[in-house]
Structure formats: C-alpha cells, structure tokens
C-alpha cells in the first residue's frame, strides 16, 4: 500500500542544536518554505526519498519549552498533537545536555513517538563529556542515536531508526514525576475524561497545574467547574514546595533532567581553559570586546565594499555591452525599450546580489557559524535596550547595512510581534549598500569624506530617536534578552554555503518580481513622455522646499526601485559623473539625506507587506516619505545658513 | 569583595562569583521561561561576564552558558556561595 510507504517526521529541538543542519542534510534540494497559517513564522518542510519511503520532514521552530509563552511554542505543540507525526526526532545538544533534556521531557509528556538525536557528540567529547547512550535510551524508553550533524555522521542510522519505529511501532516512554505531583496529576486527569480535546488527560492535567494560559482558558470554557479543583490542587503543591505551582512543575523537570544526566553522563571538565573560553576573555570583555567587534564588523564591511565595487563595475561593463547589443539588434522602439527595462530589472538585481549581498552573506554566516554573532548581541544588548529592543536586534541592523531586504527578513529572530515590527521599521532607516553608493559617490567624493561619515552618524542618531519614539508608541512590554551563548565552533563550509544560498534565494524571490514590474511601469511612464510633467508636479517639494533641481523629482521616482539609481540616472541625465557641475555641496547633502530615508526601496516595502500586512507597509512608507522630505528640507535650510 | 551569603540580586555578583537561586521575581511569564531553562529556585548559577553601563550578564547554569538581559537578571535573587 502506498500510504504505508509515507512517513511524517518532525524535527524538534532548542536553538543551536544543529536542527537546521539535520533538516538540510535530509531534505537538501527538496525543500519548500512557507509561513504557518496566519503567522509570520517560517514553516520549513522538505521531502526525503529513502529505502522506498517518501519521508516528509518538518522543521519546527527552535524553542526552549512547550509552554504558551511564544507563538512558536504554541505552533510546535499544536502541530505534534493535531498532525500526529509518525516520528518526532528530538535533537539534543550533547554539550548542553541538562538544559536540552528538560525539553525532551516536555516532548515525552505529549506521548509522541520519540527518537533522540544526540548531536555534537564530538564536541562534547572534546569538552570531557561522556554520555552512556544505552542508559539514556533506557531512562527515556526512546531510541538514542549519537550524531554529528555537520558531518552527516549518524544521520543514516537515525533515518533507519525512523523507519524501524514506523514499521514496528514504538510505545512512547512515560515519565513519572515526584509523588506529590503525580497524585495531583492523577486526581485532576481522572476528571478530565471525554473533554473532546486531542491532548491526553495527563498532559492537560500537567499543563493546568503549570498554569498554562491557553489550556486553562480552554478548560474554563468547556469544564468551568474544574478550575476550582485545579486551584485547590495548585495550593497543595504550593504549600509543599513553597513556590508557585508553575515553577514546581518546571523544577521537577529540571531535577529529573539533572538526575538523568548524573546517571548517564560523566563530565570531566578540563582544567585548562578551552580555546572558546580563551577567546571569550577578549571577545566579551567590557572594553576589548567592543574594540574587537569594531574591527571585525568594520573589516567585514570594508571587504564587502571593496570586493563589491570592483565586481559591480566589472558587471556593469558587461551589462552595458549587452544593452548596446540590444539596441543594435532589437532596436529602440517603445516595446523594445520596455522589454529591456524588464531585463534590466533582472540585471540590476544580479548587480546587487552578486557583488554585495553574496559576499556579505558568506561573511555573516561564517561569523554566525563560528559563534561570534551571539557575542555581538551580548555586547550590544545594552544600547539596543534604549530603543526598545534587545541585543539580537543588532544582527538585523548589521544585515540591513548590506541590504534592507534580508535585514527585515532577519527580524524573525525577535521573540514577539512587537519586537519584530519595531526592528523591521528601524532597519528600513539603516543606510544599505545602495545608499552608501550615493553617500560616498556624491557627498564623500565632492563634499568630503568627513561629511559622508557624518551622514552615517546622523542616520544612527535618527534611528536611535525613531526607536525611542516607536517603542513608546507601540503597545506592549519590551522583551528581555534570554539567549544561550554558544561555544565558538569551527565554521563548516557546507553549512555556510547552504545558508547563504537559502538567504540569497529568498532575496531573489521576494525582490525580483516587484523590481521588474515596477521597472517596466516607470519606464512606460518615461517613454510616454510624462516625466517632465511629473517633475514639474513635484517641483514645489523638490525645488521650493528641498532646494534641489527639478530633475531630482524623476530621480527620486527611479530611486524607489533601487536607491543607487538616483545617482546612476543623474549621471545618465548629465552625460557625466561630474556632479559638482549641477549640484552645490548643500544640495548634494540634501539629496543624500532624502535618499537615505525617503522610501524603503520597493523590494523592502514588499517584505514589510509580506511580513506585516499592506496597511503597516503603506503606513511605514508614507510616514518615511514625509519624514525624509521634512528632515531634508530642514537640513537644507540649516546648512544654507553656514554657506558651505 | 563581599562574599558573605546575604541574599542579593544576580547583578550584584562579581564576575566568577556563584550563587544559589532563591527566587525569581520577574512576573509569571519570565519566571516560567527561566524555570523551563533549568534556572528554578535552588539552582547554582555562576556569573561569567558582566558588561559596561548596566548591560546584560553572562551566566553559567546547568552546564550551559546563557546571556540574561540586565532587567531580568536584576529580578533574580541569589544567595552567594
């Protein structure tokens, strides 16, 4: 039977356990990503064909528990209960055994068929941790497979075990907690028969005693009489243990996990400091840490820009020869120009993606794989808190400096929707590499480098103020940083390339359609000869308020596609790159300020749209246009006073 | 350095100093989150790193390293040991 040859597998684990490596190893080229229904959280699915089986693999979000404190946690547990996957693979970081096993216990409470992938056993061994997998298997009554996901070690055995569990069935192990807790759980679950809920009575009872808000709400609707009972039992637990019953259950799991670790693992910590610890003496140091960070991040940008500028000038030469060929062989008719602008859209994306975004991602993922990104979050948490987000938001800013599109996408790492949106909006104000082209190509070259750097400082101040204001306006409490600090690890080439490719693909998928369509539309308006009328229409703003030449109206419209087009079009219009002939220094700075803030480019708007809905995307866009115009006008007036 | 066992907030520990968690006072959600990470009352916690200008602290608990925001860390009451 065909259905028997299909296995559904779910990967569950905490962050940094190598879950993604395992997912990529299995599903490689057969992946599809989407969002969880109605949520802005990525849903990763893939298919593996192995030994006549079609194995559907789902990567659950990396979470730390199965309580309803975050959307991801809710998604994870609902998925396991509702879809009853054939096997749940719990990826456990062998170097952080105790913390990871607390999560394993929560999975076991769901009574799902579990296989434990004990990952990073090589690093654990190096750290002097020896784990008796046989004993661990016994304790949990679940198969335990040691793996080294990065190298693929143990992953075939793991999949063989999945098939074995599917074929032979496996009674999930039952975890029994301390006597007082069990008696409360038993008493409560006895009254929970026939609730019509998919969860087991025991699980509901545990969650009720744990004061899980979602389950408590559900039960208070269908069995309101049980709430009193639950509260009595909670009191009983609280009297015995002396703290809140939700903590009593968590504590019980922690102790249980600690107990298992002490029985199954031997830890012989080396006297000598590990390389990772020695590196951390400097990289998380109060003062030296910041110095190292500036060197690393600065070095990263310098490399990307040097490399990018060179590569992009090479590409530009190639593409412009293609354009000449196009004109020569297809002609310059209305239709020919229009189709060229569609092609140009694709080429333009290549011209950003290849020279800037690709190297940028590679370096970023090297740092991430190495473990340095977590150090940046640690160092920057304090500053980030001042603008209402925590240290992890800093990562999105750094990515945003390269390109706002992946910058906004990366905000998914923030815990709450409020944080995600707040960070995304601030990222749109971060000057991306396209803006840098304007800032350095115009202001840096003709007014002075000091002014160009000044503009960056200015942007930081604006982001800081905007963050202050936004975090006051957006309802909700700021989330505190809770982040595991991974040890430094040797970056793994395959993982880096994989993640880079993934991120690049996403950038292209999101940005390409919209950039091409918008490019064609703008070109059509241009060919129809409406541009002069538009620039006249815009002149009250551009000429009267901003003090810029009327042509900038058109430039700013093209800039919606890609901001550096402002400069490219200006050069095309002038027939030279001697911008000093048409613009005064004050006008250059004014133009740079408008370009920095006036519209997140169309690709970024489309990400905002996709992630936060069109209303918010539109609101952000309009507000930023108005803000940029207002700000640049003020800058123009202020600088005019000094007569640069 | 005051190493007497008087209960104090986690942020008052020096780098390298350890303590036993007495209570978590950060509201139910945060408290629960910490407890789920194995940081319930009675757990031994060691401060590895503090940071400038009242930034976050890096701690070691149940053999794992964690970074805790300053506000959160200040709500963890420990008995230095």
Image (cartoon, helix red, strand yellow):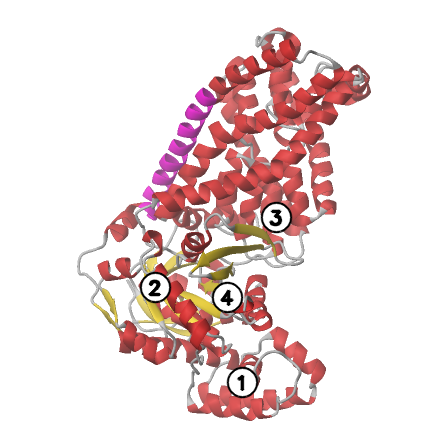
Labels 2, 4: one chain? yes
N-terminal label among 4 and 1: 4
Residue at the spot x=54%, y=28% of the render?
A350
Tell me, yes or no, if residue A615 can be seen here: yes
Residue A149 appears left or right of A321: left
Asked if disc 3 and disc 2 are in contact, CB closer than 8 Å, the reply is no
Ranked by sequence position, the earlier of labels 1 and 3 is: 1
Q: Which of the pair A328/A110 is nearer the observer?
A: A328
Q: Is residue B60 above or below residue A170?
A: above
Q: CA distance from mark 3 to mark 2?
A: 44 Å
Q: Earlier in the sequence, mark 3 or mark 4?
A: 4
Secondary structure mostly seen in magenta is: helix
Circle number at residue A225 = none
* Residue B62 image position (x, y, % from top left): 34, 69
Q: A36 or B46: nearer the eye?
A: A36
Q: CA distance from mark 2 to mark 4?
A: 18 Å
At x 34%, y 52%, the residue is: A150
The secondary element bearing badge 1 is classed as helix
- Asked whether the residues under marks 3 and 4 belong to the same chain, the reply is yes
What residue span does the magenta drawing correspond to? A283-311
Task: Report in which chain the residue with disc 2 lies.
Answer: A
On-image quarter of the N terminus of chain A: bottom right
SS under mark 2? helix
> Which dot, 1 or 2, sits closer to the camera?
2
Image coordinates for residue A349, horizontal then vertical, percent: 57, 29
User: Which residue in the structure is indicated by mark 1?
Assistant: A202
Q: Are marks 1 and 2 in contact (CB under 8 Å)?
A: no
Left or right, A97 with reference to A316: left
Which mark is drawn over residue A157? 2
Of the image marks 2 and 4, the number of the one nearer the N terminus: 4
The first of marks 1 and 2 along the sequence is 2
Structural distance between the alpha carbons of marks 1 and 3: 40 Å
């Amino acid at each position: 039977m065909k259905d028997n040859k299909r296995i559904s597998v779910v990967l569950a684990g905490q962050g940094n356990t190598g879950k993604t490596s395992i997912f990529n190893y299995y599903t490689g080229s057969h992946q599809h990503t989407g969002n969880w229904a109605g949520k802005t959280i990525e849903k990763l699915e893939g298919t593996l064909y192995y030994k006549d089986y079609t194995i559907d693999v789902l990567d659950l979000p990396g979470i730390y528990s199965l309580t309803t404190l975050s959307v991801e946690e809710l998604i994870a547990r609902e998925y396991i209960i509702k879809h009853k996957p054939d096997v749940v693979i719990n990826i456990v970081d062998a170097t952080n055994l105790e913390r990871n096993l607390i999560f394993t216990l929560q999975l076991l409470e769901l009574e799902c068929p579990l296989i434990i992938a004990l990952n990073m056993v090589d690093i654990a061994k190096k750290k002097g941790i020896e784990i008796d997998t046989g004993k661990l298997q016994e304790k949990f009554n679940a198969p335990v497979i040691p793996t080294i996901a990065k190298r693929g070690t143990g992953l075939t055995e793991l999949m063989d075990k999945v098939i074995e569990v599917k074929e032979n069935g496996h009674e999930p192990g039952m975890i029994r907690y301390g006597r007082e807790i069990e008696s409360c759980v038993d008493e409560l679950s006895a009254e929970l028969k026939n609730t019509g809920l998919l969860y087991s009575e025991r699980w509901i009872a545990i969650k009720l005693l744990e004061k899980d808000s979602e389950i408590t709400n559900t039960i208070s609707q269908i069995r309101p009489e049980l709430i009193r009972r639950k509260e009595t039992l909670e009191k009983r637990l609280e009297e015995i243990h002396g703290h809140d019953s939700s903590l009593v259950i968590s504590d019980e799991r922690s102790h249980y996990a600690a107990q298992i670790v002490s029985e199954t693992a031997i830890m012989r910590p080396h006297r000598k400091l590990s390389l990772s610890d020695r590196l951390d003496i400097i990289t998380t140091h109060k003062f030296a840490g910041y110095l190292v960070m500036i060197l690393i991040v600065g070095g990263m940008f310098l490399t990307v820009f040097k490399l990018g500028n060179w590569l992009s000038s090479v590409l530009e030469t190639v593409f412009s020869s293609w354009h000449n060929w196009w004109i020569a062989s297809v002609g310059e008719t209305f239709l020919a120009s229009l189709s060229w602008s569609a092609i140009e859209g694709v080429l333009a994306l290549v011209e950003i993606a290849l020279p800037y975004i690709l190297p940028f991602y590679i370096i970023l993922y090297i740092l991430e794989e190495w473990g340095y990104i977590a150090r940046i979050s640690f160092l920057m948490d304090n500053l980030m808190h001042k603008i209402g987000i925590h240290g992890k938001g800093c990562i999105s800013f750094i990515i945003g400096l390269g390109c706002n599109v992946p910058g906004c996408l990366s905000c998914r790492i923030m815990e709450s929707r409020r944080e995600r949106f707040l960070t995304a909006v601030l990222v749109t104000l971060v000057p991306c590499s396209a803006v840098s082209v304007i800032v350095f190509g115009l202001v840096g070259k003709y007014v002075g480098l000091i002014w160009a750097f000044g503009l960056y400082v200015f942007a930081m101040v604006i982001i800081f103020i905007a963050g202050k204001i936004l975090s006051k306006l957006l309802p909700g409490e700021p989330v505190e940083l809770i982040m595991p600090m991974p040890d430094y690890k040797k970056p793994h080439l395959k993982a880096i390339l994989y993640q880079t490719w993934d991120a690049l693909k996403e950038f292209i998928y999101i940005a390409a359609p919209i950039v091409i369509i918008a490019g064609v539309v703008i070109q059509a308006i241009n060919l129809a000869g409406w541009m002069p009328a538009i620039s006249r229409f815009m002149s009250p703003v551009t000429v009267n308020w901003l003090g810029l030449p009327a042509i900038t109206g058109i430039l700013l419209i093209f800039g919606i596609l890609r901001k550096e087009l402002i400069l490219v079009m200006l050069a095309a219009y002038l027939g030279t790159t001697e911008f000093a002939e048409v613009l005064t220094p004050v006008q250059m700075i004014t133009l740079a300020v408008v370009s920095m803030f006036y519209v997140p480019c169309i690709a970024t708007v489309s990400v905002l749209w996709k992630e936060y809905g069109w209303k918010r995307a539109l609101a952000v866009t309009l507000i930023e246009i108005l803000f940029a115009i207002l700000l640049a006008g003020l800058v123009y007036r202020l600088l005019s006073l000094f007569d640069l | 350095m005051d190493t007497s066992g008087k209960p104090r907030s986690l942020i008052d520990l020096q780098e390298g100093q350890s303590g036993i968690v007495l209570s978590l006072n950060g509201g139910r959600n945060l408290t629960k989150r910490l407890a789920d990470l194995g940081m319930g009352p009675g757990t031994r916690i060691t401060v590895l790193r503090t940071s400038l200008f009242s930034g976050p602290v890096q701690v070691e608990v149940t053999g794992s390293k964690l970074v805790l925001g300053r506000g959160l860390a200040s709500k963890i009451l420990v008995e230095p040991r």
